[in-house]
């Protein structure tokens, strides 16, 4: 496994930390409409590469299972996440959905050539604890039977993304070029959901359009290409544990942008998430395979 690939995968986590900021700055565009636009933009870098190097088009010829896993991962995750937010309190849904890094770390033990060790689990649990502190700030949890559908969707959301990430590992010989197709398919399916479920609302000014463009280029764009490469060729346990940095960095960015307030929770979460990532990455830091 490659440290370079692991770092490329972690760049996706850094880009995902911009998701909340760009989403908040995009105005009142409905989620499926926003997803359709963002994923259409996300496909553009891949399309540009394929136009510049048409011989790479043959890399899109993959077995059906590759396309099913990829489209189910990208579109399925977002569909379930939006469903969870519509049917359960955001704090509850967010915490449940963010079980996926822990599921990646634990599930990696099932992959060929991988070995799950105690420090991977400890690091992932520390990150989850830090994330729980962040997402429960300002109200805490309020689990209730009336939100059962939302909770179920959030659990499926976590299993969908972790399953997609782990399955991608078994497709390590499949070129990251296929992510272009995954993004196009997700844009189309999101558009169909928008037409059937939402009322169209366009960004109102240049700033909101800029946020939508940023969303499509980075957290919903290049991040997926980087994550695909990282989970296929990097240290998947380290990536799973380090993914807990996304909500922490997102919170810090929102505070800097004055969309949130600082407090002790951020400091404690920072210690837990950073410490958990360092613990999980112990072998990589020491220059050993894990």
Image: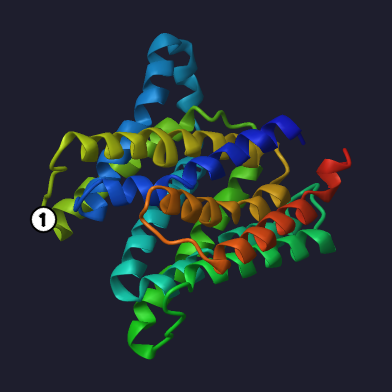
The residue depicted at 76 percent of the width and 52 percent of the height is: 278
Q: 51 above or below 176?
A: above
Could you tell me residue 261's position as x and y percent? 43, 62
Could you tell me residue 72's position as x and y percent? 43, 51
Looking at the picture, tell me which residue is in the foreground, 21 or 110: 21
The residue depicted at 55 percent of the width and 34 percent of the height is: 226
To which residue does mark 1 refer? 199
Q: Residue 279, located in which quarter of the rendered image? A: bottom right
Looking at the image, residue 261 sits to the left or right of residue 103; the answer is left
Could you tell me residue 16's position as x and y percent? 48, 46
Could you tell me residue 205's position as x and y percent? 15, 38
**Residue 61 visible in the snapshot:** no
Q: 227 above or below 73?
A: above
Label 1: few (<14), some (14–19) or many (≥20) C-alpha neighbours in 10 Å: few
Looking at the picture, tell me which residue is in the foreground, 45 or 7: 7
Q: In which quarter of the image is the N terminus?
A: top right
Q: 78 above or below 168?
A: below
């Amino acid at each position: 496994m490659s440290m370079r690939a692991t770092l490329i995968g972690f760049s996706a986590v850094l880009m995902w930390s911009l998701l909340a900021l760009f989403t908040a700055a995009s105005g009142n565009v409905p989620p499926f409409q926003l997803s359709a636009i963002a994923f259409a933009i996300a496909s553009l870098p891949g399309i540009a590469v394929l136009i510049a190097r048409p011989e790479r088009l043959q890399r899109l010829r993959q077995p059906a299972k590759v396309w099913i896993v990829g489209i189910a991962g990208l579109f399925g995750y977002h569909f379930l996440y939006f469903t969870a937010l519509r049917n359960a309190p955001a704090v509850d849904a967010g915490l449940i959905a963010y079980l996926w890094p822990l599921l990646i770390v634990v599930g990696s033990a099932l992959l060929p050539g991988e070995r799950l060790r105690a420090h991977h689990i400890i690091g992932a649990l520390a990150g989850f604890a830090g994330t729980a502190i962040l997402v429960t700030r300002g109200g805490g949890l309020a689990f209730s039977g009336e939100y059962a559908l939302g909770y179920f969707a959030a659990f499926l959301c976590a299993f969908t993304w972790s399953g997609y990430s782990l399955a991608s590992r078994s497709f390590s010989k499949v070129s990251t070029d296929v992510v272009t197709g995954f993004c196009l398919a997700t844009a189309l399916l999101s558009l169909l959901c928008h037409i059937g479920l939402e009322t169209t609302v366009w960004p109102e000014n240049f700033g909101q359009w800029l946020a939508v463009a940023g969303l499509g280029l980075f957290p919903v764009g290049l991040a997926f290409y980087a994550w695909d490469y990282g989970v296929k060729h990097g240290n998947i346990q380290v990536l799973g544990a380090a993914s807990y940095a996304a909500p922490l960095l997102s919170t810090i960015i929102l505070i800097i942008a004055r969309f949130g307030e600082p407090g002790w929770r951020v400091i404690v979460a920072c210690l837990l998430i950073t410490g958990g990532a360092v613990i999980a990455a112990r072998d990589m830091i020491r220059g050993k395979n894990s």
